[in-house]
Amino acid sequence: MQQEIINAIALTRISYFNLAGILELYRRVGSASAIIEHRNNIRDIIPNASEKLANAFKNLSEPMKRAEAEFEYDMQNGIEPLCINSPRYPQRLKECDDAPLVLYYRGTADLNQRRVINIVGTRHCTPYGQDLIRHFISDLRQYCSHALIVSGLAYGIDICAHREALAHGYETVGVLAHGLDYLYPTRHKQTADEMLRQGGLLTEFPINTNADKVNFVRRNRIVAGVSDACILVESAAHGGGLITADISRSYNREVFAFPGAVGAPYSEGCNNLIRDNGASLISSAHDFISAMRWEDESALQKAQQQGIERQLFPNLSPEEKKVVDTLLHTNDLQINMLTVKCGIPISSLTAHLFNLEMKGVVKMFPGGVYHLLS
């Protein structure tokens, strides 16, 4: 097993600019060790292999030396090399044509959780964007008690998403554009340390790799590939978050965007993406959960049970109790439907709904939809 990992690391050293070629080789022969064994007759495996790919295997001494040094460093520093055939490797990413043969990981989170969301956007996050993330992640707990939040640990939207995830009890993983022997930006070290205990740090880059500009673009495909859905919070017209959204679409992932004010520089990218049908518009966690059909059955059962118990509360008037009973049977109704089902005139129903909101029993969502809270 150790030698297989070292061989896989060595292959990543010689295939940096030919991920698809080396991945095809790997999938045909089934292991990095088998590729090394056939290094002198690569065209027996892939007859149409490029000259560059075939010649890359002629001198393996330097890549093997670096791979051995990488493995030794990883073992000494709590870094887990994840080969593509490892069950701990992100299986969603494994499906992608340009998946890396090896990932390097530090952390506690399972990268193959049932639900994985990436939240991305501008490095110039505004108070509007911060509020969107805060409310989204807070409200998400009502509908989805377990999810992994992924981002890039960069300034702005990324770090805000990580910190809100931590604050609300979600595990969160940062995908880095450099090796795990240092951290960029250093100002995020405290948050990164918390993430190691409640999430993790992930990269395809070996040690001694700087956070060069091109690496951030490569990093974006990992963010997209490990996730079920991409949420773009704020973006300029040509922001980096748009790259992640585009890659997500190419991987057949769901893409969502929060709209912003017309003319706002860091909402322009989101608004354009929605306009061009590159993302679905969301304004809340409820919108997102409904679109993904991620209703947490256990949470719903709990909400229903609490709703039943709520009928016993003496502080609900007969009309308020009628509204609660109606929403227990059919949740998320607009006021025109509620008035029909409850048999209460809208003029009176409006006052009852306001009282129920003040008591924390119901909440009005966008579109005038009333939701019975858990």
Image (spheres, grey):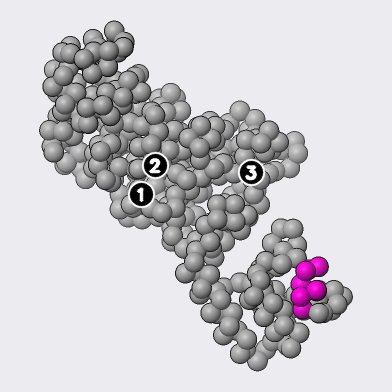
Whether residue 69 is visible to the viewer of this picture, yes or no, is no
| Of 126 and 251, the residue lying toward us | 251
The first of marks 2 and 3 along the sequence is 2
Q: Are marks 1 and 2 in contact (CB under 8 Å)?
A: yes
Q: Which residue is mark 2?
A: 92
Q: Residues within 10 Å of mark 2 (few under 14, many from 20)?
A: some
The first of marks 3 and 1 along the sequence is 1
Q: With respect to residue 116, does 20 lie above or below?
A: above
Left or right, 274 with reference to 337:
left
Whether residue 47 is visible to the viewer of this picture, yes or no, is yes
Image coordinates for residue 19, horizontal then vertical, percent: 34, 23
Going 16% across and 33% down the picture, which residue do you hit? 4
Going 42% across and 28% down the picture, which residue do you hit? 218
Q: Which residue is mark 1?
A: 112
Q: Which residue is mark 3?
A: 280
Q: Which quadrant holds the C terminus?
A: bottom right
Q: Would you say residue 340 sits in the magenta stretch?
A: yes
Q: Which residues are magenta?
A: 335-342
Q: Could you give the CA–CA distance between mark 2 and mark 3, rounded to whole angstroms? A: 21 Å
Q: With respect to residue 269, does 338 lie above or below?
A: below
Image coordinates for residue 272, horizontal then vertical, percent: 68, 34
